Image (tube, grey):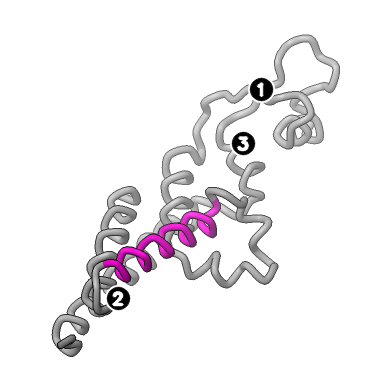
Amino acid sequence: GFFTFNFAIYSYFGQAFVCLVENPATALILSSVFIGLNNFFAGLIVRPQLLVGSFFAFPFYITPGQYVYEGMVTSLYKGSPKIVTADVGGGFFEYLVDTGVCVPQQPEPCQGTVSDFIDVFFGGVFTDDHISRNALILGGILILTRVLTFAGLKYIRYN
C-alpha cells in the first residue's frame, strides 16, 4: 500500500514537472530537489521528534514522504511482539531501564518489543492511529499531482 503510494508520487511528480517546465533538464533538476527534500524531511535522515515543534515542522508536514514512511513503519511493526535487543547506553536501552524491563548491570541482553522500539526511536510521533489519515493525505497528493499534470498539458505551451 504505502510503498505503492511512494512510487506513484515520485512518478506523478516527475510527470508534472515535465509538463510544467520548458525543458527536460529543468524537470530533472526539480525532481531531484523534490526527492532530496522529501527524503530529508520524511523522518529518514532526521528523526521526526526533532522536526516537530520547530521551524522545520512545516516542511515535515507538507512532504509526502513523511506520510509514506510513517504508514509503512507503523503498519508493519506497530503492535509486533518480535523481540529487539537493546544496545547498552542507547535510547531504547535507557527506556527499558526506566520502565523496569531491564537492570543496568544484568548479565543477559536487555530486550524489548519492536513496537516499543518504534515508540522510542520516533519519539511517539509515528503512531498507528495515523494510518488511515496518511492514506487519505497521500491520495489527495496524488490527485493534486494529476491535476497539475493535466493543467500543464492543457494550458502551457512552449514555442
Q: Would you name the residue on which mark 1 appears?
A: 111
Q: Residue at x 31, y 56 (%)?
A: 5
**Real-space Cα distance between discs 1 and 2?**
44 Å
Q: Nearer the viewer, mark 2 or mark 3?
A: 2
Q: Relative to 55, is 62 on the left or the right?
A: left
Q: Hey, which quadrant is residue 41 in on the image?
A: bottom right
Compare marks 1 and 2 and give the one earlier in the sequence. Answer: 1
102, above or below 125, in the image = above
Q: Would you name the residue on which mark 3 appears?
A: 117
Q: Hey, which quadrant is residue 103 in on the image?
A: top right
Q: Secondary structure at mark 3?
A: helix
Q: Secondary structure at mark 1?
A: strand
Residues under numbered marks 1 and 3 in contact, where contact means CB atoms less than 8 Å apart: no
Q: Secondary structure at mark 2?
A: helix
**Real-space Cα distance between discs 2 and 3?**
35 Å
Q: Would you name the residue on which mark 2 appears?
A: 144
Q: Residue at x 66, y 22 (%)?
A: 111
Asked whether 56 falls inside the magenta stretch, the response is no
Q: Nearer the viewer, mark 1 or mark 2?
A: 2
